[in-house]
Amino acid sequence: MNESLRNIWTILKRELTGYFASPVAYVFIVIFLLLNGFFTFMLGGFFEQGEASLSRPFFNWHPWLYLFLVPAAGMRLWAEERRVGTLELLLTMPITAWQAIVGKFLACWTFLALALALTFPVVISVFYLGHPDGLAIISGYIGSFLLAGAYLSVTLATSAITRNQVISFILSVVICFFLILAGWEPVTNLLVRWAHPDIVELVAGFSVMPHFANFQRGVVDFRDLLFFASVIVFSLFSTSVILRNLRGA
């Protein structure tokens, strides 16, 4: 393992251990699983839909669940470092800012992946009750994982802006909410009245919903993968710019 990967692995282990060193991680996972179950079986119409599918009752709620839960999980990543004064120490260690950013991002993404993986009883239930499309379920999980990563990358950037975790949380929710609403039909219809159609189309292109919807339908398209990868890379790059400015300040 080269020096760069070793540094990333060290940061990843440090952050992941920090999550499970307190009861916050367990509370987060329990809340996530309870809300998933509630929305799937109570509000999602799982039993009323008349078919063995997770597309609508289960995955439909993930953009909205992640809207609050992902910022809550990631808001401390840099804000806490700034609050307690360890950010300067971290940035003076023999690691690059990018290694620290990637390590923290992968640690929290791994934590979110674990929470998502623990929803497996829902998958078992749908297979017990019928004969669902297994590939569509796998595709939906891939899309959900990428969606969580996109929200998390945004949270990482907002966390680097401020030492206040609440402010980081609010900024993340607002930005991720925009990523949901950008392509929502009532919003685009409103924009058409005030802006050129090309501008409306550009704004709608930032929406995560159509890209996530393809995964829900069992379609893994390269353009959708590229979209989520672009959001993640751009947000992580923005984080590096913010940290570089803090280092130079």
Image: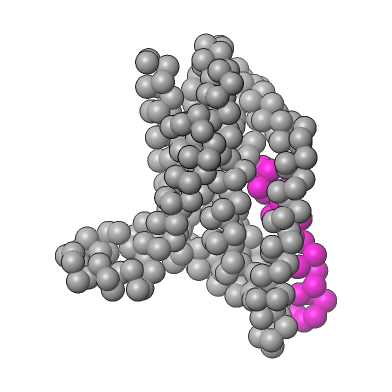
* Residue 48 vertical position relative to residue 30 in the rendered view, above or below: below
Residue 55 place in picture, x, y as percent? 61, 73
Span of residues in magenta:
110-131
Quarter of the image where the C terminus is located: top left
Quarter of the image where the N terminus is located: top right
Task: Characterize the magenta stretch by its predominant secondary structure.
Answer: helix
Q: Residue 190 or 6: which is nearer the viewer?
A: 190
* Residue 82 vertical position relative to residue 135 in the rendered view, above or below: above
* Residue 181 vertical position relative to residue 89 in the rendered view, above or below: below
Residue 5 place in picture, x, y as percent? 61, 25
Does residue 99 appear in this view? no
**Quarter of the figure with residue 216:** bottom right
Residue 4 place in picture, x, y as percent? 57, 21
**Residue at position x 73%, y 42% in the image:** 25
Residue 56 place in picture, x, y as percent? 60, 75
**Residue at position x 71%, y 31% in the image:** 18
Say left or right for 97 vs 118.
Answer: left
**Residue at position x 58%, y 18% in the image:** 86
